[in-house]
Amino acid sequence: MSKLYLMRNPRVAARSLDGEMMIMSGRDSTLFTLNKTATILWQSADGATPLDEIVEKKICGEFEVERSEALADAESLARELAGHEILQISDVPIAQQTSVVGEKR
Amino acid sequence: MPVRVHTTDPDFVRLLQNRYAGFVSDSDRAEIEFDVELGQPEAVDPDADVKVGYRHGRWSLRRGDFLAEWEPAVRRGWIRQSANPYSIDAVLRIVHTLVLARQGGFLLHSASAIRNGKAFLFAGVSEAGKTTISRLAPPDVTLLTDEISYVRRQNDKFVAFGTPFTGELAKLGENVSAPISTLYLLAKGKENRIDPIEPREATRSLLANLLFFAKDQDLVQAVFYSAFEFVNHVPVARLTFVPDARVWELIG
């Protein structure tokens, strides 16, 4: 399986409140409230750390879930967040990549 | 925020003077000026929803009944509409949301009123009770609006101002202001009671009741962060009430 890298979209407004991440899309003012897993993905999405490493270090320990199952769920969630333009995702580190999956201009 | 309107039609001037009675002055100071061209706006779908865009330093505002532009750098714009008070009213609301967003303020779907020197906001969707609680206000309460509250940040306080933006009550607010004491989220019920609300729900509810029309990422972010600042500074509670005047015994 190829690596997947995530990066926060700097064009959205985000604020954590009582451990819950609230994000507003600047495109259409939609408000998103992230659950715990999505919040971990958001906070770890630095463009350099691959998703499998995020899952292993920050999700498996937190939720006591099988690594393969957690990775599949996390990838699905990351793609969903990318669809809302909250995250950018790519199969190469985002600082080096030339095209971004799920990012629209 | 003083707005000067230029028009060559004396009937339209009188219409505006009546519409905004209490908010009209002969002051030379204006922060925004609009030239109003009366006539039917062309090339606009009469049923079109409001659209707000920004290009080359100008905001363009359009709806089925008006076209308008506003250039913030020179604080000037124009409105093309027929001789009615509703179109210019909508333009002024939109422009105020744009100006307030940069200043840490916003317009909010809520009634507001002053009692004992403190302002109280009553937010909710249509039918939540904004008009009802405004109508029930006792004589010592100064109504700021029954529909659209005008909120500005002043240092570490949020202040509510009276507006001429009316709802069902069709009664203008008073042209006064006061620091906001509490934001109440309205709910009709079988008893009068006030319940605290946790910050997350307070923020979500506040954001849901904000008026903002522009799909502009910078301003959306500004309004989003203003909502968090507001909840950090102003208590938010749920006000459940039966529709009679006793609810005001809990306020102030």
Image (cartoon, helix red, strand yellow):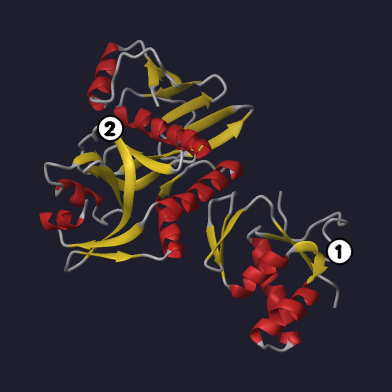
Closer to the eye: label 2 or 1: 2
Q: Nearer the viewer, residue A10 or B7?
A: A10
Chain at numbered mark 1: A
Name the secondary structure under disc 1. Answer: loop
Q: Is residue B40 above or below residue A92?
A: above
**Quarter assignment of residue A84:** bottom right
**Quarter assignment of residue B201:** bottom left
Count of marks, rendered view: 2
**Whether residue B42 is visible:** yes
Q: Report the disc number at residue B65.
A: none
What residue is at 49 percent from the left and 47 percent from the top? B226
What residue is at 54 percent from the left and 25 percent from the top? B72
Residue ID for mark 1: A92
What residue is at 19 percent from the left and 42 percent from the top? B169
Q: Is residue B29 left or right of residue A95?
A: left
Tell me if mark 1 has few (under 14), some (14-19) or many (20+) residues whose alpha carbon lies within 10 angstroms of its own. Answer: some
What residue is at 35 percent from the left and 10 percent from the top? B8
Q: Amino acid at mark 2?
A: Val
Report the quarter where the N terminus of chain B lies. top left
Q: Is residue B175 left or right of residue A57?
A: left
x then y, percent, for residue B202: 41, 60
Q: Amino acid at mark 1?
A: Val
Q: Is residue B190 left or right of residue A21?
A: left
Q: Report the disc number at residue B176.
A: 2
Q: Is residue A67 above or below residue B192?
A: below
x then y, percent, for residue A23: 57, 58
Chain at numbered mark 2: B
Check if mark 2 and mark 1 are on a common chain: no
Name the secondary structure under disc 2. Answer: loop
x then y, percent, for residue B168: 22, 44
Task: Measure the C-alpha gap from mark 2 to mark 1.
Answer: 58 Å
